[in-house]
Image (tube, rainbow, N blue to C red):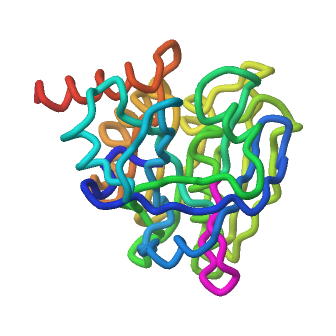
Amino acid sequence: MADRPARKNRPAVKLRVLRTQQLTPHMIRVVAGGEGLARFQPNEFTDAYVKVLFPVPGVQYPEPFDMGVIRAELPREHWPRMRTYTVRYYDAAAGELAIDFVHHGDEGLAGPWAQRVQPGDDLLLNGPGGAYAPSAEADWHLLVGDESALPAIALSLEHMPEGVPVRVFLEVGDPSEQQPLVTKGDAQIHWLHRSTGESLVKAVRALEFPDGTVQAFVHGEAGFVRELRRYLLDERGVRKDLLSISGYWRRGASDEQWREEKAAERSAK
């Protein structure tokens, strides 16, 4: 996921769900494909994100499914709900695109959908957007995030240059939520468990920074992201052009509330 809008006012890419996979107790992978995948245009970013569209039940939408037309012709309460997700992988040869969803029972919108979706169901999305990929300019890399950033971090690790130093800090609920991560980089991966009260901010502050220029990717819950933004920019002097940092969600706020808060902050600047 990322904090910039995916491309708008183009017909949505309509995919067909091929299968689902339970990766951990709270992470489900949805793999989709079909004829619509030919319209998906991948980009060069490892945080390539899409807007997944969830139609409002009972509403008749125009074809093709175009958000620009929908916004112009339908009342706001009939607009599809949107959630932003990172593309975990895109495989043109296999005809597959995968998205990993965090789910907590009936909580939220996308998680319950991923839990009940069946092969043959539609997956509607706009995008992709993106802004980050590992840069050859960096001497070493810092990747920090929670479950919401895990797909982007996992894909970024897979694209790291061979032997480059990487320091990774990932916060998940408990050890059962850890996933195998693959990289050619010289990676030190630290899993933190929310169940024991471990803190990403404390762990990053305790890190002895390697020599050289760092490129950092810090994404996830807005609270720790805000703290690490100040630390990395003000205390560590990380270059802004080599810092990808975004609050994907905020504890205590719905997705719609968080988007409104971020929009208000941007307009106030």
What is the number of callouts on the image?
0
Q: Quadrant of residue 120?
A: bottom right
Query: At 40% across and 56% down in the image, what residue appears?
Result: 126
Query: At 61% across and 68% down in the image, what residue appears?
Result: 165
In the picture, measured across the screen, residue 30 lies left or right of residue 87, that is right
Q: Position of residue 106 (x, y in %)?
A: 71, 21
187 or 174: nearer the eye?
174
Q: Position of residue 109 (x, y in %)?
A: 58, 29
Looking at the image, the residue that sits furthest to the top is: 252
Quarter of the image where the C terminus is located: top left
Query: At 60% across and 33% down in the image, what residue appears?
Result: 200
231 or 49: nearer the eye?
49
Q: Position of residue 33 (x, y in %)?
A: 64, 69
Looking at the image, the residue that sits furthest to the right is: 176
The vertical placement of 98 against 116, above or below, is: below
Q: Quadrant of residue 37?
A: bottom right
**Is residue 140 highlighted in magenta?**
no
**Is residue 97 highlighted in magenta?**
yes
241 or 95: nearer the eye?
95
269 or 27: nearer the eye?
27
Q: Position of residue 67 (x, y in %)?
A: 31, 48
The vertical placement of 140 against 136, above or below, is: above
Query: At 76% across and 45% down in the image, what residue appears?
Result: 28
Question: What are the residue bounds of the magenta stretch?
Answer: 89-99
In the picture, measured across the screen, residue 268 lies left or right of residue 53, that is left
Secondary structure of the magenta portion, mostly? Answer: strand
The vertical placement of 66 against 146, above or below, is: below
